[in-house]
Amino acid sequence: YYSEGYRVGNSLLPQYVIRSRLSQLKGSILLDTREKIRANKTKQVRNSTAYIMTCLLNNICEYHSDIMVDPVLNSM
């Protein structure tokens, strides 16, 4: 949150992008992220902070893309 950016693969997301994504965080996204992390029984996680941050950002993006695609959710 306080670093200048966050590296995902070969891309560097600037701080303002990370902050804007985290401002969209909801309780349901946190619960879904927790369940996805708990369901990961096969992959060994080396850097837990980076793993959790990546899961959170991915879930935030998934949530908002679902709203854009689903006309019922989009109308709410």
Image (cartoon, rainbow, N blue to C red):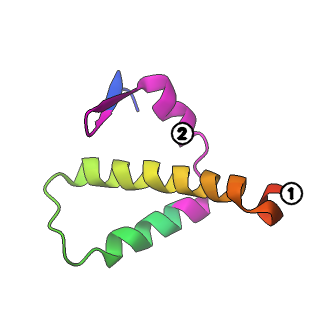
65 to 10, vertically: above or below: below
Q: Is residue 67 magenta?
A: no
* Residue 10 can be seen, yes or no: yes
Disc number placed over residue 75 in the picture, else none = 1
- State the separation of the CA atoms marked 1 and 2: 22 Å
Secondary structure of the residue carrying numbered label 1 = loop
Quadrant containing the N terminus in the rendered view: top left
Q: Please provide percent x and percent y for residue 7.
A: 29, 34
Instruction: Return the disc, 1 or 2, that comes first in the chain's sequence.
Output: 2
Q: Is 28 within the magenta? A: yes
Q: Residues within 10 Å of mark 2 (few under 14, many from 20)?
A: some
Kindly identify the amino acid type of the residue bearing the numbered disc 2: Arg
The label shown at residue 21 is 2
Question: Residue 62: image x %, image y %?
Answer: 54, 56
Residue extending furthest right? 75
Span shown in magenta: 7-29
For badge 1, the amino acid type reads: Ser
Q: Position of residue 24 (x, y in %)?
A: 61, 44
What crowding class fits label 1: few (fewer than 14 Cα within 10 Å), some (14-19), or many (20 or more)? few
Does residue 19 appear left or right of residue 12 in this picture? right
Q: Quadrant of residue 13?
A: top left
